Amino acid sequence: MDREQEKLILKQHIIKYLNLLHVTPEEITDDMPMFREGLGLDSIDSIEMVVMMEREYGLKIENPKDGREILQTINSMMDFIEKGRAAKAAEEKA
Amino acid sequence: MSKIVVTGIGIISPIGNSVAENRAALQAGKSGLTSLELFATRYATLLKFGEIKITNEDFKQQLGVTTKGVTRTTLLALYAFVQAIEDRGFTNEELQSSDTALINGNTIGGMSESENLYLDANKNEVGSEYISSYNLGTVNMYIQQRYKIGGVVNTFNTACSSSANAIAYGARLIKNGFAKRAIVGGTDSLAKFTINGFNSLGILSSSLCKPFDAERSGLNLGEGAAFLVLEKEEDAKGKKIYAEVSGWANTNDAFHPSSLSDNGDGPYLAMKEALEIAKLKPEKIGFVNAHGTATENNDEKESVAMKRLFEKVPAFASTKSNTGHTLGAAGAIEAVFCILNLMHQEVYANLRFEKTIETTGLTPVTEYTKMNLEHVMSNSFGFGGNCSSLIFSKV
Amino acid sequence: MFYIHQSSCISHQPTFNEVDLEDLKPIENNLVHAIEPKYENVPLGQLRRMGRALRMGVGTCMKLLGTNKVDGLLIGTANGGIEDSIMFLNQIHDYEEGRLTPTAFVQSTYNAIAGMVGMITVNHGYNATHVHRGHAFENVALDAAMLLKENPDNCYLIGGVDEISVKNHRLVSLAGWYRHDNVSNADLYKGIAPGTLPGEGSAMFIVNNKSDNAKAKLTSLRMVNSFDENVVKEQLNLFLKDNPGKIDLFLQGENGDNRLLKYYTACEGLMTNETTAARFKHAFGEFQTVSALAVWLANYVLQNQKLPEHFIKKNSTTEFKRILIYNNYQGAQHSFMLVERVK
């Protein structure tokens, strides 16, 4: 699956977990800020997204401060997912 | 205007089963925070809890409870209620009178029976013995029925400020002529539901909580109950009077469902309005029993609010360092502690404090201290922006 | 006590926008479900994570607060977000207490309704949630009456809301309070069986001390805690003595449960032939805060001077000036409320 398809799936997960009625994946742009402005999410949503990362991608975000950086935009989340996948693949090879 | 005074108190908390035991523990700087022993949860040894080490069966025996479906939340309340009414010495006639009110605050009700609730809601074909007990109102319903309380009966749920609001409501019922006496308080018991709820928000600490400390890492949940008997001073002739309930306020922070605003608006307004009711200037407050949950958000914002209100922040401490956060019971349990402050002219240590919060620089009381006190304030701030503040005064 | 100025209501009947009480809407599956409208003044960003009770409660509040400012908010709800509570509990079970999503927990808290409205309207005033079963709304009314004594120039938003919720329905049903046979709401009062029909809804009011432009007045209120119908009757007697005058409409909360008929029979026995008797739970269903909807209905009757036929049990007067509401919840919490027309 390429990065564009992965992004679409990520946006669909976000919409589902946060029950974002009336928001389509197309309306969530890649560099749109998730919190306060942009999509206007809050701290409860950030926790929901941490759970989403664990349940959907098997990736844990232990430190809330790391969480803020990782969850900032679609692009930052994609980078985190791709890094996580690469690390898992390297582990499995070893 | 008549003073509303406290003529009976009852308490059970993680640091003692009576007023005397609680005072002794506070004086000695003892905390009741341990691993969880009485029910199974993944977090039993991972987190710290203020658990009362008495089983439900033991409570039922001690309290003569034979009815089915009485939950731990009710048992704790009953324990404290009985102490309070025996302390005041009521006749049956007085309890059953239509001008005796019974008000409590709690947040878990019978949902402390988390396993049974799960089964009843999802699987059971026949309801368990707790099928009618989950509702928050069942606590006071049980007490009202057992003692035939004849007046207004009510239950508040404004999260962690529930029993502070119960106390204020009782005082106001008397002041406005809807009751002659009010038995007011709060209760909450530890439950899988609340443990997991708070844990999902990432605000529970795996170590002993450190209110107002720069390195604080969250709260420890606790359980307990306390009740006060309130009446007008002139109706209390010949009775022991502990203190006056001189001020109260309920405001809303209006910022976020589970955290306080940057300027601590709700807490600031609650403290300010309680002073207005008490007709006191801020400098008259000798000591503040702070909400002080040891979460990053609360302790900083409460400090900000205190600095906004008080030119010189009075001595303050959080007794949650001893008991943990008893949620719906906190307002009432901490009211009893404020009464102890006034009765014995002393304040107790905020345990495990080492370093001030950088942005606010406030230091709580760190040792048991004898202190001249006329007026003591107690803060309770909860989810939903619900902020309450009470003031107790020496009589 | 206080004057009622504005009101809003969500119920099984169309009551939120155009009110239509003439034709009793039928029910399905023994559930007196409320009609959820398109909500005004509720930010989508907040609406998205609200459960049903929260939506109905916040929706009825915000209908009134779009243009009105109030000094405080008082909500009665005996179940809060029970559906969300059980959803969270199920998560605990399904994920074996692992990493859980917090929204259901936060939104299940009983004070979420009053808290959310406070947040949306940035209202720093008094904010209370009363949850005592069949007296949740009555304590809201009493609390508001006291606030208005203490702050005579203020005004408050008050009301009550509860939802049916799939899981809560199961609990109350297992406890034996609902009819198991198929019942039409039009036949509710045949009183042939134990059990009633569950309902849900929300009614909110803006109240203050000013009679100018007021729609109605809640003059008096009394709560009784007893299972003894003689005690309830005696208390009603005292209430009537304290509030002398002709009662035009006795609006009572009979719900078809044959175990509870005795209370309504006892109280109706104190009414005269000049009093019209009417019932409302066939239209609204049974739930702890339905008395808030009864007040809304009383207000409607006083405004419109009519009550559709299907509400009426015994006809008498044609002019409605003083309405006595009597309700009880499971025979445990009883209340009397006197609602009067403002000249």
Image (spheres, rainbow, N blue to C red):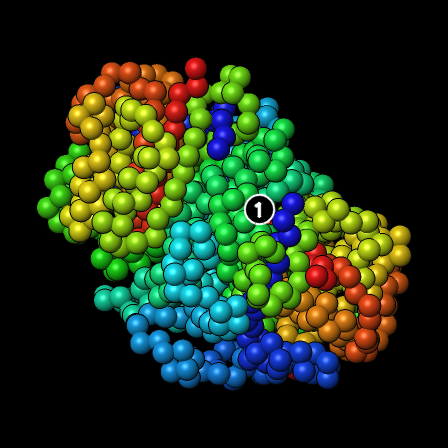
Q: In which quarter of the image is residue B115?
A: bottom left
| Residue A25: x %, y % from top left | 57, 42
| Residue C278: x %, y % from top left | 23, 30
In-image side of B97 versus B191 (left or right):
left
Image quarter in which the C terminus of chain C is found: top left
The structure residue drawn at horizontal position 24% and vertical position 53%, both measured from the top left corner, is C228
The structure residue drawn at horizontal position 67% and vertical position 78%, both measured from the top left corner, is B23
Mark 1 closeness class: few <14, some 14–19, many ≥20 residues within 10 Å: some
Badge 1 element: helix
In-image side of B126 versus B361 (left or right):
left
Residue C170, compared with residue B326, is above or below; it is above
| Residue C241: x %, y % from top left | 33, 35
Give the labeled residue for mark 1: B175
| Residue B27: x %, y % from top left | 73, 80
Q: In which quarter of the image is residue B55?
A: bottom left
Q: Which amino acid does the dot numbered 1 rest on?
A: Lys
> Farthest front residue?
B238
**Is residue C4 among the parts visible in the rendering?**
yes
* Chain to which the residue tagged by mark 1 belongs: B
Q: How many labels does the image show?
A: 1
Tell which of C109 and C100 is nearer to you.
Answer: C109
The structure residue drawn at horizontal position 51% and vertical position 16%, both measured from the top left corner, is C213
In-image side of C128 versus B71 (left or right):
right
